[in-house]
Image: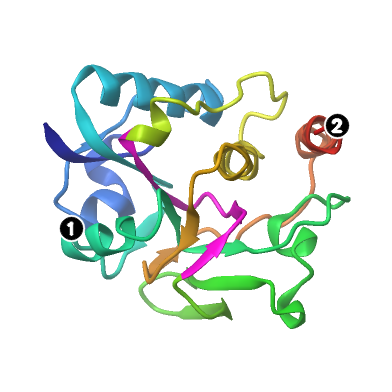
Amino acid sequence: MIKRMIFSASAVDGADTILHKSTNKMIIFKNKNTQSLHSTYNKAIDFSIQENIENLVLVHDDVNIENFSDLKLDRLFERFDVVGCAGTTQVNLKPPALWHIMGGGIESGNLHGAVAHGDGNRRVMTSFGSYPKRVVMLDGVFLAIKRKVFKKIRFDESCPSKWHFYDLDYSMQCHKAGFKVGVGDILVTHQSPGLASLSKEFYKGQEWFLKKWKSK
């Protein structure tokens, strides 16, 4: 069995991405940003099942993984079935459907993990709260998933938003199915500043997400 695969969707050649330059692990690029992340990540799941891969790691292509190691992830997998670098222990399903807002914000005590934003010249760290910690919802900048999880749980391709809610929905699915979702000490620097504005596509996805989970 292959122990681990790192997968990222990218519009450029894999060797040119920040992610490729930050890790020498196996990376497969199958998306030219024409398909949704839900669909692309399901292809990664299909590939992982077919190739008998034990753990699947899904990462944004504009991310620098600062301190990744197999040993560190193995230790986190002793506690959790799905691992991210930021998430929340509580969710209040309401707009705007952003994980940290629905989690109550920094002062709530519900947020955990840390993510840096910036480039090689300047980096700003956002520390949400203590970790490792079991949570119910994860940010999708980094997702590590055990085989027993991705064999059962897939990304929901009925979402009308290509780039949003794949992570919130997937982690909520995993939590609801009884899998242990957690935040660990995986330090990443995201070269994107995050969601700068809410597009029409975001609002379509938000309506879908809130309707789906409020009915459960």
Tag count: 2
Q: Image point 58% across, 79% down: which residue?
A: 129
Q: Bin the neighbour count of mark 2 within 10 Å (Cα to Cα): few under 14, some 14-19, many 20 and up.
A: few
Q: Quadrant of residue 45?
A: top left
**Discs 1/2, front:** 2
Does the rendering let one see residue 162? yes
Badge 2 is on which residue? 215
Residue 150 percent across, percent down from the top left: 40, 31
Is disc 1 placed on a helix, strand or loop? helix
Q: Quadrant of residue 51?
A: top left
Badge 1 is on which residue? 70
**Please, what is the three-letter code of the amino acid marked with disc 2?**
Ser
Q: Bin the neighbour count of mark 1 within 10 Å (Cα to Cα): few under 14, some 14-19, many 20 and up.
A: few
Q: In this view, does 94 lie to the left or right of 43?
A: right
Q: Is residue 137 magenta?
A: yes
Q: Image point 69% across, 72% down: which residue?
A: 110
Q: Image point 36% across, 38% down: which residue?
A: 8
The tag earlier along the polypeptide, 1 or 2, is 1
Magenta stretch bounds: 133-147
Residue 149 percent across, percent down from the top left: 41, 35
Magenta: main secondary structure equals: strand
Q: 182 and 60: which one is in front?
A: 182
